[in-house]
Image (cartoon, grey):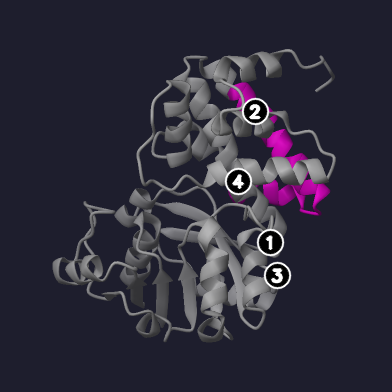
Amino acid sequence: MSIAVIGAGAFGTALAITWARAGHSVHLWGRDAAAMADAQIKRATPRLSEAELPPQVNCTSDLAEALISDTIALALPAQTLRAFTRAHASALSSKSLIACCKGIDLETMAGPVTSLQDTVPHATAAMLTGPSFAADIAKGLPTALTLACQSEVEGTALQTLLSTQTLRIYRTTDTIGAELGGALKNVMAIACGITMGAGLGDSARAALMTRGFIEMSALAAKLGASPETLGGLSGFGDLVLTCTSPQSRNYRYGFALGQGQVFEKGTTVEGVATAQSVVALAKSLELDLPICRGVADVITGRKDVPQTLDALMARPLKEE
């Protein structure tokens, strides 16, 4: 079976590696022609320097070559996914499309699956999400993810196709819950990074994770998602991973903010745009999400870390 991975960043490359090891022919597409040609020859990429690309991975910058595959994993940033699928809607039509990003589009307030449905209505739209780091997947370490697809039949087929000996995939038809869990945990990871970078301690981080999960669940319930989805891999599982490990870019970004430092230039941090999207979405729904709002305030410079902490600690006391 041929699978295309669009996006040759660390996560896309890791997926290409694990699917190739499982015996699939994989087209790994990236925009940089020179970088992809170099990866094809050297069987390695700077994005995952310790990982070797199996022979079954074809590195290419020719999009038409990659889109020959009927199953296409879109490992693109959430804020560029919609533009990409709209621009190539004709070539993507009737394919099985799996979004491998987490976020809420700033312009449309749509999650990845919704963006696929809007831009390529005649394709199968799905999302792969959950607690995972690219380096772990590439090393063949045990990882469990959630495949969200509204069609149970098509979701089951993709679950069977994409699961490997080291990549265990669970299935859900609750695409809204999967979208929100994956997006919102990035905001909470930034909050926890800020907390630890500012030296506020593990107790404060635990409180933020707990209250943050309540905010995630509240927004999800408001939009019709299942509580079980938020309590699973795509919500709680991903929250635990990204709020506690410096491998998370969102956590590292928050940590840098907490220390008053500049973060790594050119690194995509999905939670930055998502925090601002969530605040706007919550406002339209008349929903109070103080942690999300606090993260957005710090990111945009409206408030500094001490001011945001004071605002959170001064909120009215209430029953849990």
Q: Mark 1 points at which residue?
A: 175
Give the mark nearer the N terminus: 4 vs 1: 1
Q: Mark 2 points at which residue?
A: 294
Give the mark nearer the N terminus: 1 vs 3: 3
Question: Tag 4: residue type?
Answer: Thr
Which one is closest to the eye, mark 2 or mark 3?
A: 2
Instruction: Tell me the distance, in whole angstroms, between the alpha carbons under discs 1 and 2.
Output: 27 Å
Q: Residue 274 carries which label?
A: 4
Instruction: Tell me the distance, in whole angstroms, between the alpha carbons under discs 1 and 3.
Output: 6 Å
Question: Tag 2: residue type?
Answer: Gly
Q: What element carries label 1?
A: helix
- In the image, is residue 75 part of the stretch drawn in magenta? no
Give the mark nearer the N terminus: 2 vs 3: 3
Write down the quadrant of residue 94 in the picture: bottom right
Instruction: Tell me the distance, in whole angstroms, between the alpha carbons under discs 2 and 3.
Output: 33 Å
Q: Is mark 2 on a helix, strand or loop?
A: helix
Range of magenta residues: 206-235
